[in-house]
């Protein structure tokens, strides 16, 4: 099981940081278990690693085999929770350079997560002479960014393969019954996968939203689900030994001490996209009602040479959560020549892994001494099983943490504000009054 270590945060925490929150955590756990809290209709993810639809996962694997056979590339169209989880685990379990290293497996491109014509045109041009398939992912089926990207990539597929041929290359992941994408998929006869009604986007990586792209890349998705199930079994047990309880309590206590910003830090570039997924998970779940820890992410040691100064000596409202793996996947032995002028002779015989670990230890000590509490989460290997544990750990801790701070961890009302203004400015039917208000220089509420 994952190990959570609070040692380098203890000097910043009151002695009762955990004990004083046990009642709150007990209640938060009850709300997650029986779905009776705010947003309780979106707690389907709590039991998902046990109750997931085995047949659908089987179909995900079969479809992945088809895509792998017929395509040099898979285009995953989705935004927010409809792509971040897949991308996070793809980069964690393969490489941030997956598309260069994937060999005979299809390249995987994530698009539909912005409105940049340059970015979309670039990818459309690249794929023009490639065989590719599309997995369009949208729970609501109405989100503008993926809808526009789907329009463009569907047109390209139809140009290349005809309407019939395109149909065999389009896979839609959406609500089982509702939404524009579901209606379109039914009408066109696309193969579809479901995001369960009771699972919101940022908690959906263990549904086909995350699993299909991962399976196409050859990632062992059953291993991920096994890891999540093992974490679920451990973390749903109540008590102060529970690492998710400790994490939720520690960040809640640090926030109460004025530590408003949490940096998720890793010492592997493979964790970079995971940081993006984690930011959405915590940011959208907790950032509401005028409160919430602001989630940021850093990649060490890279960012020690850009953000390190601020972290060490800037405003003292930060804390850091480091994710670490203990078992390396590769060895890189250092063997400088005795007369090597590089000055690295003292590292002879050392593995780079050792150097990285000393950087981590030294940084934790320096940051804690500089006023930045350090939390540490340790996993074993960078494998599907451990990745599944990490996903479940953060989701469960986030649910606990949201309830502990009294917010609904499963809605995102604030996301609508920009959409409303964008629709009004674009002249979308139904948004005329808001358009008038904006053009008159008024600030519409909501
Ligand atoms: O967490 C969420 O619910 C959001 O980030 C959504 O995933 C995101 O807005 C995309 O929504 P949809 O899948 O409906 O297109």
Image (tube, rainbow, N blue to C red):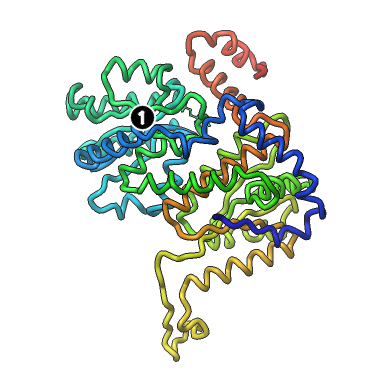
Q: Quadrant of residue 372?
A: bottom right
Q: Is residue 186 visible?
A: yes
Q: Is residue 414 visible?
A: no
Residue extending furthest toward the right: 15
302 is higher (above) or lower (below) than 137: below
Instruction: Indicate the secondary structure of the residue bearing disc 1.
Output: strand
Of residues 233 and 4, the one drawn nearer to the viewer in this rendering:
233
Q: Could you tell me which quadrant the N terminus lies in?
A: bottom right
Q: Position of residue 413 (x, y in %)?
A: 61, 24
Q: Position of residue 393 (x, y in %)?
A: 56, 46
Please give the name of the residue rendered at 42% of the width and 17% of the height, measured from the top-left corner: 179
Q: Quadrant of residue 340?
A: bottom left
Instruction: Return the residue at label 1.
Output: 136
Q: Position of residue 422 (x, y in %)?
A: 53, 21
Please give the name of the residue rendered at 58% of the width and 27% of the height, measured from the top-left corner: 415
Give neighbour class at mark 1: few <14, some 14-19, many 20+ (Cα, 10 Å): many
């Amino acid at each position: 099981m994952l190990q959570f270590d609070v040692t380098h945060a203890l000097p910043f925490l009151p002695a009762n940081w955990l004990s004083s929150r046990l009642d709150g955590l007990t209640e938060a756990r009850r709300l997650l278990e029986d779905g009776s809290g705010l947003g309780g209709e979106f707690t389907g993810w709590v039991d998902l690693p046990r109750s997931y639809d085995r047949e659908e996962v089987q179909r995900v694997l079969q479809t992945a085999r088809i895509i792998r056979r017929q395509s040099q590339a898979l285009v995953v169209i989705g935004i927010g929770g409809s792509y971040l989880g897949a991308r996070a685990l793809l980069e964690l379990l393969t490489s941030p350079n997956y598309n260069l290293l994937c060999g005979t497996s299809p390249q995987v491109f994530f698009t539909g997560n912005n409105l940049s014509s340059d970015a979309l045109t670039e990818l459309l041009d690249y794929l023009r002479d490639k065989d590719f398939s599309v997995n369009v992912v949208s729970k609501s089926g109405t989100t503008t960014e993926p809808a526009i990207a789907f329009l463009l990539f569907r047109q390209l597929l139809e140009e290349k393969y005809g309407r019939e041929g395109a149909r065999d290359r389009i896979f839609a992941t959406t609500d089982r019954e509702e939404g524009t994408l579901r209606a379109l998929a039914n009408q066109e006869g696309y193969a579809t996968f479901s995001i369960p009604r009771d699972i919101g986007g940022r908690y959906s990586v263990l549904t086909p939203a995350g699993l299909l792209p991962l399976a196409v890349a050859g990632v062992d998705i059953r291993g991920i689900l096994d890891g999540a199930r093992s974490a679920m079994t451990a973390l749903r047990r109540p008590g102060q030994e529970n690492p998710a309880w400790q994490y939720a309590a520690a960040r809640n206590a640090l926030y109460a001490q004025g530590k408003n910003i949490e940096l998720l830090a890793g010492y592997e570039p493979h964790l970079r996209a995971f940081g993006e997924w984690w930011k959405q998970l915590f940011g959208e779940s907790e950032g509401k009602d005028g409160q919430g820890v602001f989630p940021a992410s850093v990649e060490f040691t890279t960012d020690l040479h850009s953000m390190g100064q601020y972290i060490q000596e800037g405003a003292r409202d930060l804390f850091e959560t480091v994710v670490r793996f203990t078992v390396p996947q590769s060895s890189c032995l250092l063997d400088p020549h005795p007369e090597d002028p590089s000055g690295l002779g003292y590292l002879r015989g050392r593995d780079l892994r050792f150097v990285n670990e000393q950087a981590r230890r030294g940084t934790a000590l320096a940051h804690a001494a500089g006023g930045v509490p350090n939390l540490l989460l340790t996993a074993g290997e960078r494998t599907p099983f451990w990745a599944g544990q990490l996903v479940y750990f953060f989701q469960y801790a986030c649910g606990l943490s949201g309830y502990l701070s009294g917010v609904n961890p499963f809605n995102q009302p604030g996301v609508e504000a920009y959409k409303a203004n964008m629709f009004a400015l674009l002249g979308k039917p139904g948004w005329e009054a808001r358009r008038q208000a904006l053009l008159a220089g008024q600030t519409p509420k909501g």
